[in-house]
Amino acid sequence: NAGVTQTPKFRVLKTGQSMTLLCAQDMNHEYMYWYRQDPGMGLRLIHYSVGEGTTAKGEVPDGYNVSRLKKQNFLLGLESAAPSQTSVYFCASSSRTSWRSVETQYFGPGTRLLVL
Amino acid sequence: GESVGLHLPTLSVQEGDNSIINCAYSNSASDYFIWYKQESGKGPQFIIDIRSNMDKRQGQRVTVLLNKTVKHLSLQIAATQPGDSAVYFCAERSQGAGGTSYGKLTFGQGTILTVHP
């Protein structure tokens, strides 16, 4: 049971390039989330998904797209990277078996992205 | 908008002391709170949670206190150890429309806890 995994761990992009970050979870969780973490800003929600085939915008969705084709995977895409997207990206997942479980989000190790 | 903030950005303690990390929240409709620990280079790790109908909850060496009157949350760590050194985040959940919730959390900025041997 690996929990939540993210690939890649680190990536350097040039402005305008595109890339996809992959998140995978093996806990059969319904909910998945993408956050970015910047110094002094805490964790901010980019997009989330409440189930396979559904996605929704979070707090800072501009410049990102997501897809949830399979329950265990949640992809975050940057179509045209900008220096402002330099950040650490975290994926999380949670289940909805109880009032408690829906909130206990389990996080992956993060992806460090540098946009030059 | 909703916000969750911390009174102190850094906290330094000696090994064996008790630590108290504070958090203020602004949304009186928040009904669930979580504390996460984040070590350098790692993702946030769940520590303990508390529902708004409680004012205290205890775990292993940790206690969370909730004061809804002043919208204040605290995390107490007993007998702090060097391995407790990390950034600690509080997070709050507010109920969505119709009482539903998709688990969206609002995080505070974090407090850096440093434990000296």
Image: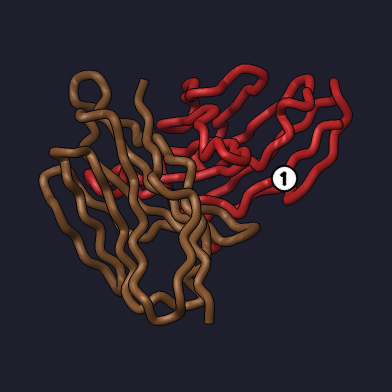
| Colour for chain A in the figure | red
Q: Position of residue B72 (x, y in %)?
A: 25, 44
Q: Residue A11 falls in which quadrant of the image?
A: top right
Q: Position of residue A13 (x, y in %)?
A: 85, 34
Q: Is residue B40 above or below residue A100?
A: below
Task: Provide the secondary structure element on which disc 1 rests.
Answer: strand
Residue beneath the point at 30% across and 67% down: B62
Q: Which residue is mark 1?
A: A112
Residue beneath the point at 35% across and 49% down: A104
Q: Residue B79 falls in which quadrant of the image?
A: bottom left
Question: Circle 1 marks a residue in which chain?
Answer: A
Residue A26 in view in this figure = no
Residue at the limit of the structure toward the left, as seen here: B53
Q: Amino acid at mark 1?
A: Arg
In the depicted view, which residue is nearer to us: A102 or B107?
Answer: B107
| Colour for chain B in the figure | brown
Q: Position of residue B114 (x, y in %)?
A: 52, 66
Q: Is residue B2 left or right of residue A99?
A: right
